[in-house]
Amino acid sequence: MHTLTFPDDFLWGAATAAYQIEGGWNADGKGESIWDRFCHTPDHIENGDTGDVACDHYHRWREDVALMQRLGLSAYRFSVSWPRVIPAGRGAVNPPGLDFYDRLVDALLAAGIQPFLTLYHWDLPQALQDMGGWGARDTCGYFADYADRLARRLGDRVRHWATFNEPWVVAFVGHQYGWHAPGLQDEALTLQVAHHLLVAHGLATQALRAADARLQVGIVLNTRPVEPATDLEQDRALADQYWQRNEGWFLDPLLRAEYPPAAWEDYGDRRPAVQPGDMPLIAQPLDWLGVNYYSRGVAQEGQILDPVPGSDYTDMGWEIHAPALRRLLVRLKRDYPIPPLYITENGAAFPDEVSPDGRVHDPRRIAYLRDHLIQARLAIADGVDLRGYFVWSLLDNFEWAHGYAKRFGLIYVDYATQKRIVKDSGEWYARVIAHNGVEEEAD
Ligand code: IFM
């Protein structure tokens, strides 16, 4: 068997997000978030699930850090709950909330694990939503204040900061499709929200650097590249249109200081109001860019194929197609002035169960992760400056509108008892980390 070895300082991580794992939804002075409100409203989430308890990480974080150490992680990506730290989103800080992240960071560092902190993974304080949420430009300033306060407390120990996780999802899934909090279906608002998220990114980037010039500031984008099924002009044009309206809608402002011109034209009166100075504010240099990749789309004869004939799918109904990851990374390097990259999320949901032997055998997840790591390594050989890889997710957790029905973890969580069981994929990932590389054949 041949091992594909990664660069010596490559970071091996796993990722989570506050609302998906913490629980403690109203513990110790935490404020209500839009996800608390959304889940407490009937008929929003499969099975009536909520993040009230989730993986109870708020109380079990020591055990979870010990598990990370057992896997050998060199980095851990987590998000901070804004309303845990500033319950109303602006104004007074909640000291116990800030202390929680302070202790977590110390424990990670003591375990030799680099913290990668995301400021916003979707849980806006409800008090700010009541004032217009991301549709209101004032929210951008409150976000920058929140960034400043966190940086002043944690910036001496946390090096890598992401402003946002997946702003496309925040804007479109939360404000146009209505499947996520705040559950709006308002096309006219969606692109204004997207623009405000980018402005907030710019302001928070300034705030973080003002607090400590050594901070490495980035942003995490979701990608689902649509690839043309053939070389025909019709297929290529549709794939390009998808790119511009989705990936490009965020990449171009961040890296080229403009919205993609064709998509800007197409959007007509849905275009956001842009104030003078916004585009250079958004396009400040990034220290790194996070790419979340799970799946691709395929454009053929005017439509996106679903399903793609002959393909395998995860429990989310997402096509498994690892080679598109390499093509995506190479495309980013070719088409954009990109900073160093991290794959900040990659993983798969499968219907895992505890076997009679007490273990969780998840060979399909191992195959998924292996195939994607191989493509990531090939992209490095192609010249892509890829610095690290984070599995989504460390733990099974609350998968938004699907509740607990989808399991993405390297570690199984029995929600009734909160018992954690490292899955076969977790043991496999530990070996990958130990060898700093991945076997090309099944081991
Ligand atoms: O669980 C989510 C995560 O919060 C953001 N990226 C995609 C994951 C899987 O859907």
Image (cartoon, helix red, strand yellow):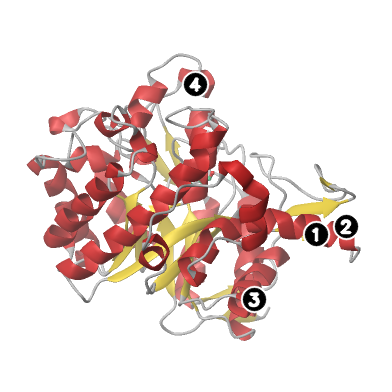
Work out whether 183 lies above or below 6: above
Helix, strand or loop for disc 2: helix
Q: Which residue is mark 4?
A: 44
Pick the residue in front: 435 or 253: 253
Work out whether 98 lies above or below 28: below
In front: label 1 or label 3: 1
Q: Which residue is mark 3?
A: 330
Q: Amino acid at mark 2?
A: Gln
Work out whether 323 lies above or below 6: above
Mark positioned earlier in the residue sequence (4 or 2): 4
Q: How many residues crowd mark 4 within 10 Å: few (<14), some (14–19), many (20+)? A: many
Q: Marks 2 and 3: in contact by CB < 8 Å?
A: no
Q: Is residue 109 left or right of residue 398?
A: left
Q: CA distance from mark 4 to mark 3?
A: 38 Å
Q: Is residue 275 left or right of residue 355?
A: left
Q: How many residues crowd mark 1 within 10 Å: few (<14), some (14–19), many (20+)? A: some
Q: Decide if residue 404 is in sight here.
A: no
Residue depicted at 15% across the width and 42% down the height: 97
Q: Which residue is mark 1?
A: 237
Residue 192 screen position, x and y as percent: 46, 44
Give residue 57's mark: none
Q: Marks 1 and 4: in contact by CB < 8 Å?
A: no
Helix, strand or loop for disc 1: helix
Q: Marks 2 and 1: in contact by CB < 8 Å?
A: yes
Q: CA distance from mark 3 to mark 2?
A: 23 Å
Q: Amino acid at mark 3?
A: Val
In front: label 4 or label 1: 1
Residue 367 screen position, x and y as percent: 66, 58
Residue depicted at 67% across the width and 44% down the height: 314
Residue depicted at 49% across the width and 63% down the height: 253
